[in-house]
Image: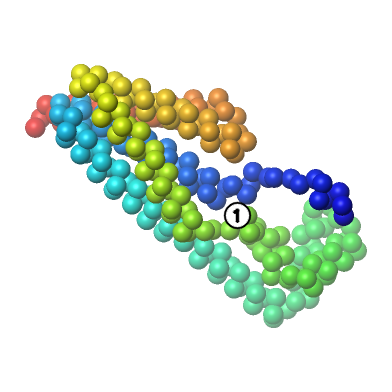
Amino acid sequence: MAWMNRHQEGHLTSRIGWLRAAVLGANDGILSTGSLIVGVAAAAADPHDILIAGAAGLVAGAMSMAAGEYVSVSSQSDAETAELDRERQELADDPEFETEELAAVYMGRGVEAGLARQVAAQLMAKDALGTHAREELGISEITTARPVQAAFASAASFAVGAAMPLALVLVSPTNWLAFLVTGGTLLSLSGLGAVGALAGGAPVRAAMVRVTFWGALAMALTAAIGAVVGRMV
């Protein structure tokens, strides 16, 4: 088994849980806060009010992301737990049937019947529940739901993302504030799309174009609504 020690593989699927939450949180932080700032600026608000609105959006957004992610992933975790409890009971009630069921999974993948039954029996003897969770239910250690991890990752990444357009408010001249925040937000979204694609092993250009397009659309709509409301009040 020495060759296994020399050949250590690192698979990107191990990043799925935290990567999804972190990228979503940062993207939402940049876009929602940048859009909020541009919308308030389009309503002819002064920089002080814009900064207050942006800071409030950062705090509220981070807490909302944390709560929403926790509730969502907790629901997934509850469903996984219920499935595992059901599978545990089925293994206790009829282990022979469960062994045949597992063997059928391997036969469906092309393994010869006799060998499939032999593999199923050996895996059942070692870790029956873990094997059925992985092969029958698609639940593994890598992909299992982690609500607290997802909540913290979303909140922290949202705050980091939202800090960028807020920082631009502090350093931008009043007449150029909306333009600089818009440009900085779109550049940040594009960069985040590239980072997320590289971390997940996906095409970089497509990710950058996708996130920049939707970001530009969201900011344009927010600015238009802010300008209309600013004239009305």
When the figure is inspected, residue 88 is found, relative to residue 51, above or below; the finding is below
**Residue at the location (81% across, 51% down)?**
5
When the figure is inspected, residue 88 is found, relative to residue 53, above or below; the finding is below
Q: Position of residue 108 (x, y in %)?
A: 79, 55
Query: How many numbered tags mark residues here?
Result: 1
- Name the foreground residue: 18 vs 81: 18
Residue with the most extreme left position: 233
**Quadrant in which the C terminus appears:** top left
**Quadrant in which the N terminus appears:** bottom right
Three-letter residue code for mark 1 = Thr
Q: Position of residue 162 (x, y in %)?
A: 35, 38
- Can residue 222 be seen in this snapshot? no
When the figure is inspected, residue 29 is found, relative to residue 169, above or below; the finding is below
**Residue at the location (52% across, 58% down)?**
146
Coloration of the structure image: rainbow
Q: Mark 1 — residue?
A: 143
Q: Position of residue 22 (x, y in %)?
A: 47, 44
For residue 72, which quarter of the picture? bottom left
- Name the foreground residue: 218 vs 52: 52
**Residue at the location (37% across, 56% down)?**
67
